[in-house]
Image (cartoon, rainbow, N blue to C red):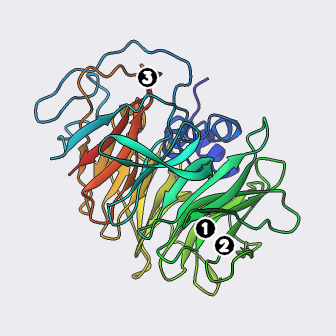
Amino acid sequence: MDMSEDERLRDLMLAVEVPPTTADIGLAIATGRRQAARRGTTLAGAAAALALAGGTAYALGVTPSPGGSGGAPTGQQPQGAPFAACTVDTVDVGVPTGIPVVDPAGRLIVATAGGTAARLADGAFTPYTSATGQVVAVNAAGTVVGYDEVDEASHMLAWTYRDGTKTPLAKLTGYAYTVPTAVNARGDVAGYAMGEANDDSVPVVWPADRPGTVRALAVPAGYGEPGTSGSQAAGIGDDGTAVGNVRGAATRWSPDGTPALLPVPPGHDLTIATAMRGGHAYGLARVVGADRNSALRWDLTAGTVTVLTGAPDDITDGTPTGWAITTGGDYNQPTRIAPDGTVERLPLPPGLQLPPKGPGAVAASISDDGTTITGATATTDRHLLIWHC
């Protein structure tokens, strides 16, 4: 069933921030099925939770386009958007895989392969011993963050994998489940504690220097929209600053846990933060009185927000210098957004079969320098995608 932008954003506000598994955060945003994605069609890389076409075959073909390895179906790409000066490698490892993530330094590419976290190198995966579960993120030191699905409702328990050891992350008192979304350079993990209901969630940080502990982040009563439940931490900086959402209000927490609302651009109301890197956070906001959303970039140092006019609103990741990536929404083409707001299409493999509407591929993770982007196709014969820019 088609949803209005108002209904879609409300779904985002009610839903929790889901990390990568067999569906992706970015794709869930793009399709407006965040809640369904969280229940089982969760993300395979981002995350973010995007449904990766589990079991459904699509028949719409890709038309190769000049200047790239492939293209999007006519009429489904950002109007006039050029192709990025990137090449794309496809990887088929022969086992079910999640969407790969790249560390900020661009050296490690990690994904779930055959149910186990594994490192990708030279077109092949090397499993991490005993690291079963779904991968969410990896830092430059090699700390892998992920989760196990523990029941048919796709409830999750978060873990880290360091130096050959998989360690469960502590539960918050009163909450049975834990979901990670990001990790910083020193190994602090951001995410949320979750109850039985989809909208029963609290943003948390698991500090690396206090193993076995979890810290709840403040959710002030005046934040967000009445009736919009569920709060999550979506990203964490190397100094411990976190960003996320409190009942439909994008929020920043300082390293000591002090909360502050992120600025809302004029003409917008509900906001959601989906990613953070360095001094920038990324997300979207609802346009007041219109059936659409706007993509946003916040400068956390200056305390300002920029509306990325014309950009798809499903940002999955970004860099410290202002580059961002998206699934491309209904354009059906992953895109890259430059610091000046220019939107570029990421090339797709020739001959890729895409669904008639919505993302046929996802860009889920980008290195700090913007030169390596990881993602995957959303087709039944899943291929991993690695862009070099």
Q: Is residue 234 visible?
A: no
**Mark 3 neighbour density, 10 Å: few (under 14) some (14–19) many (20 or more):** some
Q: Are marks 2 and 1 in contact (CB under 8 Å)?
A: yes
Q: Is residue 246 above or below residue 213?
A: above
Q: Are marks 3 and 1 in contact (CB under 8 Å)?
A: no
Q: Is residue 214 visible?
A: yes
| Mark toward the start of the polypeptide (3 vs 1) | 1
- Mark 2 vs mark 3, CA separation in Å: 36 Å
Q: Residue 356: horizontal and vertical position, in percent?
A: 41, 19
| Mark toward the start of the polypeptide (2 vs 3) | 2
Q: Residue at x 63, y 87 (%)?
A: 256
Q: Residue 266: horizontal and vertical position, in percent?
A: 46, 64
Which amino acid type is marked by label 2? Trp
User: Quadrant of residue 229 in the image?
Assistant: bottom right
The residue that disc 1 covers is 190
Q: Residue 140: horizontal and vertical position, in percent?
A: 41, 68
Q: Is residue 133 above or below residue 218?
A: above
The residue that disc 2 covers is 206
| Mark toward the start of the polypeptide (2 vs 1) | 1
Q: Is residue 62 left or right of residue 49?
A: left
Which amino acid type is marked by label 3? Asp
Q: Is residue 182 left or right of residue 192?
A: left
**Mark 2 neighbour density, 10 Å: few (under 14) some (14–19) many (20 or more):** many
* Residue toward you, 310 or 389: 389
- Mark 2 vs mark 1, CA separation in Å: 6 Å
The residue that disc 3 covers is 381
* Residue toward you, 148 or 87: 148
